[in-house]
Image: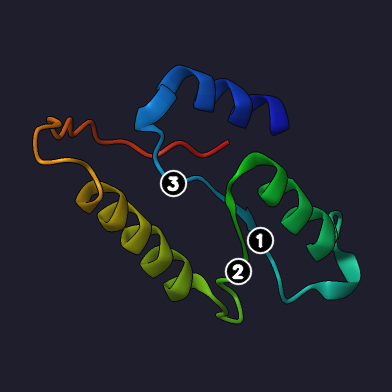
Amino acid sequence: MHGNIVSFRNSKGMDMPPVFIVGSDGHKEDKRVISTDSGEHLASELGCVFMEASAKVPNNVTELFESCARLVIQQRNSKSPNQPNKIRGGCALL
């Protein structure tokens, strides 16, 4: 995953959208493959947002989408007025 995020960042340059690393099945604490600390460390290292979510419980699913939307809006609003707003839709799941 690390290499995919780095490649994605390099290809996007300054137009980098917010990137989230999501630990799924957060309700299965005893069966985790990657610890919360490891996920947070990787996200910090790559400049991403880390969240844990579980659709089954449900936990943090709504918060995840709200956070994503909030960051996209903040990023668009922070662009200078003379900078064109290139809207290229898409979502990348790595």
Crowdedness of circle 2 by 10 Å Cα count: few (<14), some, many (20+)?
some
Query: Residue 24, which numbered label?
Result: 1
CA gap, disc 2 to disc 1? 5 Å
Q: Amino acid at mark 1?
A: Ser
Q: Earlier in the sequence, mark 3 or mark 2?
A: 3
Q: In this orientation, which residue lies closer to the viewer: 78 or 2?
A: 78
* Residue 4 in the image, given as x and y percentages of width and height: 62, 26
Which residue is at the far right? 30
* Residue 74 in the image, given as x and y percentages of width and height: 29, 57
Q: Amino acid at mark 3?
A: Pro
Q: Earlier in the sequence, mark 1 or mark 3?
A: 3
Crowdedness of circle 3 by 10 Å Cα count: few (<14), some, many (20+)?
some
Check contact, mark 3 vs mark 2: CB within 8 A.
no
Locate residue 67: give its quadrant. bottom left
Residue 84 falls left or right of residue 7:
left
CA gap, disc 3 to disc 2? 17 Å
- Per the image, the residue denoted by label 3 is 18
Q: Earlier in the sequence, mark 2 or mark 1?
A: 1
- The structure residue drawn at horizontal position 44% and vertical position 46%, both measured from the top left corner, is 18
Residue 74 falls left or right of residue 48:
left
Mark 2 falls on what kind of element? loop
Locate residue 53: give its quadrant. bottom right
- Per the image, the residue denoted by label 2 is 53
* Residue 27 in the image, given as x and y percentages of width and height: 73, 76
Check contact, mark 2 vs mark 1: CB within 8 A.
yes
Crowdedness of circle 1 by 10 Å Cα count: few (<14), some, many (20+)?
some
